[in-house]
Image (tube, rainbow, N blue to C red):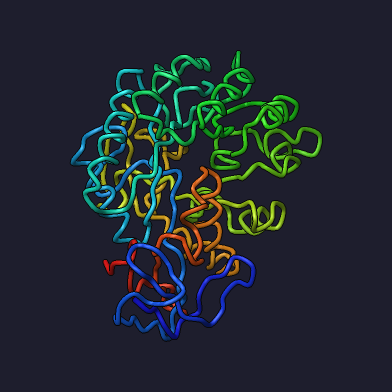
Amino acid sequence: MRITNGQVFDLEQGFVGRDVFTDGALISESSGDGEVLDAKGCYVIPGLVDVHFHGCVGEDFSDATPDGLQKIADYELSQGVTYICPAGMTLPEDQLTAICKTTAAHRKKNAGGAEVVGAHLEGPFLCMAKKGAQNGDYLHDPDAAMLKRLQEAAEGCVRLVTLAPEQPGSVEFIKAAKEMGIHVSVGHTVANYDTARAAFEAGADHATHLYNAMPPLAHRDPGVIGAAWEVPAVMPELICDGIHIHPAVVRLTFGLFGKERMIIISDSLRATGMPDGEYPFGGQMIEVHGNRATILGHPETLAGSVTSLMGCLRQAVSFGIPVADAVRACTYNPAKSIGIEDRVGTLDVGKEASAVLLDEQDLSIKAIVFKGKPV
């Protein structure tokens, strides 16, 4: 396939006018067949990578049902999200084990839809005070032995785990997670600057939905946000749905951390792609009105988003983030944050041929190519 006439995303230059060639599932220096895809008037970007979301179209990753995970993967691909690392909730170990086993089984099936590149355990190693929409009944102190059991159930595909580093044993947990090939993210925490800095220096390299479920940045108490900024390896997530973070703070944070470190996530729920109403979430009920989801009966407590990652990309651009920077934050950066940037996240020769054509005017999807094949 030859994708021609488009403005192609480039990690260093932003967008450049060039052709993209595919030969089978990979990007190549020349086309392996005569198929041509005209991208005139379009940005040609890598397929998006979402490392933090819970579900969509009525399905939740934490339900651990094979059919549900397949529906999630199918919907995400239809939205230009080609690689997904869905997040589990704070649940009992037996349910977390089921989530991990379902993920491993799905990866073996290769039944279509977005590729499930792994799992993100957003719980249960969080703190009660900042649990947010998580179920406090199932919170658990950091437990490396438990994490190892879950990684074994997942057959090695747990990619990311969120941790409140003020909990006992956190530094040892971080080091053990790294040995298992798992990236550690600081989040759902009341950690002060010193505690967060110690976690990052121990090897945590990710911050879960920055600003949400953590203390604010204060001039005498910089907290997690200040500590994250000072350690260059740390990549912070932002939920750019227009609800969780004010547009000015989105702009400020991109300026503070730089385009090389920012990750846009959707944190989307099963209500994404569904009508307003009430939906189960992590053993609780949420209510959805428009693009706002809250815990039922607690309208001040946000419960995640109902916006796809592609929708968040568009929101970030509408907030003033340059298109190339928003694209990077939805593709290469999240891929790098979980260690898969060697094969996805850019349109360089040798990478997987997953691309999305976006109209240059409104960023609507004009075409999707997944591993060399039109969707």
Write the residue at 66% across / 53% down.
253
Image spot of residue 45 (x, y percent): 46, 68
Q: Look at the image and tell me in which quarter the C terminus lies.
A: bottom left
Name the image quarter holding the N terminus.
bottom left
Quadrant of res 116? top left
Q: Residue at x 55, y 62 (%)?
A: 326
Q: Measuring from the top left, give residue 334's x and y in whole percent.
A: 52, 50
Q: Position of residue 206 (x, y in %)?
A: 59, 39
Instruction: Name the residue nearer the viewer: 299 or 275.
Output: 275
Give percent across and percent down for residue 271: 30, 46
Q: Is residue 167 above or below residue 227?
A: above
Name the residue: 43% across, 73% down: 363
Q: Is residue 226 left or right of residue 337?
A: right
Q: Is residue 2 left or right of residue 244?
A: left
32 or 19: nearer the eye? Answer: 32
| Residue found at the very far left of the displayed protein | 67
Q: Is residue 210 left or right of residue 24?
A: right
Who's the residue at 62% across and 26% down the image?
Answer: 190
Q: How many numbered marks are there?
A: 0
